[in-house]
Image (spheres, rainbow, N blue to C red):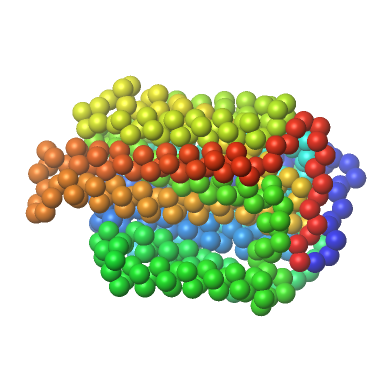
Amino acid sequence: MGPPAARPAAPDPLRWKALVVLAIAQFMVVLDASIVNIALPSIQDDLGFSDANLQWVVNAYVLAFGGCLLLGGRMADLFGRRRVFIVGLALFSLASLAGGFATSAGWLVVARGVQGLGAAIVAPAALSIVTTTFGEGAERNRALGIWGALAGAGGASGVLLGGMLTEWAGWEWILFVNVPIGAAAALLAPRYVRESRGRERTSVDVAGAALVTGGLVVLVYALVDAERAGWGSGQTIGLLALAAALLAGFVLVELRVVRHPVMPLRIFRNRNVASANGVALLVGAALFSMFFLLSLYLQRVLGYSALEAGLAYLPLAFTIIASAGAASRLVTRVGPKPVLLVGLTSTAVGLLLFTQVSAGGSYLGDVLVPSLIVAVGLGCSFVPMTIVAVAGVSHAEAGLASGLINTAQQIGGALGLAVLSSIANARANAVLGGGPPDPAAIPNALTEGFQIAFLVGAGFAVVGIALALLAVPRVRRGDPVVEAPAAA
């Protein structure tokens, strides 16, 4: 790999306008990971999804997103970050349009997968542009604070917008809405975003990307279908073995086969990168499933309409925005590690409180307070994780580092959702017993499943606290950050 690209001699005068364009795109990408949650009951009724397969509306997107992020980040470094960013926006918008016209479950799942591929191209390109446009220090922290606030707001406001669109226009419009947003960002990018790339000129590691994506898809499918097939069945054991073989093949390809791997493993010698990605995996596992489970609780147990469930997320959305902004200022003063620990602790506490939801509960008694605590945790976790994950990485590999942190979050989300959804469904089915379920018993059975799933999610957050305490470096204000050498 060639030497790192030189930093700009002077700050880009359009950098803040560029940040707006990039943040809009990131808002859309994160929004789409959560906007479908509120529409899930309507989608299930319209397209005939089973309870077990409904999560694939979310996981098809998350898996393609997480599995291809490394490839997207590498493409951005090699072929030009702005160019790749615009291509990703075009693909994302077209897939959204196709998904809105879906008439079957399979059609929608495929469209969501292509959306995830587009998002995997957009997200690392956008974040790598931010990290190469703003120098390390207070200005980058401020930029990433804005980035984190909008990204977090996208996750929370997605359920609000999803409720409004589902109620007033139909679930199809949760996909159609992406088309004008994506088109606007693609048209504004050439005007405000400066092109940049790493200095190397190499081929793209398609084999590595295919192996890691295939391995993760097989792993998640094995976890999703294990409740039906049985955890000790030949299918489950065989799929888990196949996933392990594919992922081992990925590691072998990256280490021995290709000259320019999609994920140079040397980058994990950077302690910032390794620790931040480990924490991000656990945060994703805890929080993605929370949105999924909470949306079903509000509608299937408390009886909320899609619009009412969306409005129920408003306090959470505003709290995420406020906490992310506060986190960016605190990181500049005290460093990322203390802020990250506050965020992870808040997340764990909020999820533990969610284990107290009841079939006869209420929004004020069961949902509002835990939502606000989790929102503080999300805002205070995302900003320092992102700052640590790209600190000390050469400009030539900004796309790779950006892809890694996004990958960890998305893959953690996919795996967490598969595990927690399976746990919730298994418990609900056990409570209902065999035979046709008594409609009056369904809310209580669902709630018991949600309670156990929330408890496991809180466990993920607790493990994240332990990892952050032991592995994340404590960087104090004013400490120099030395750029890591470009990985071979």
Above or below for 16 versus 288:
above
Q: Quadrant of the C terminus?
A: bottom right
Above or below for 148 versus 227:
above
Task: Look at 38% across and 63% down and name the residue there.
Answer: 221
Above or below for 20 versus 311:
below
Q: Nearer the viewer, residue 166 or 213?
A: 213
Q: Nearer the viewer, residue 340 or 55?
A: 340
Q: Nearer the viewer, residue 325 or 104?
A: 325
Residue 80 in the figure: left or right of residue 24 = right
Task: Look at 71% across and 56% down and name the residue there.
Answer: 269
Residue 337 in the figure: left or right of residue 396 = left
Is residue 396 in view?
A: yes
**x and y percentages locating residue 229 in the rendered image:** 26, 65
Residue 275 in the figure: left or right of residue 14 = left
**x and y percentages locating residue 440 in the rendered image:** 11, 38
Q: Residue furthest front?
A: 470
Task: Look at 30% across and 30% down and name the residue there.
Answer: 356
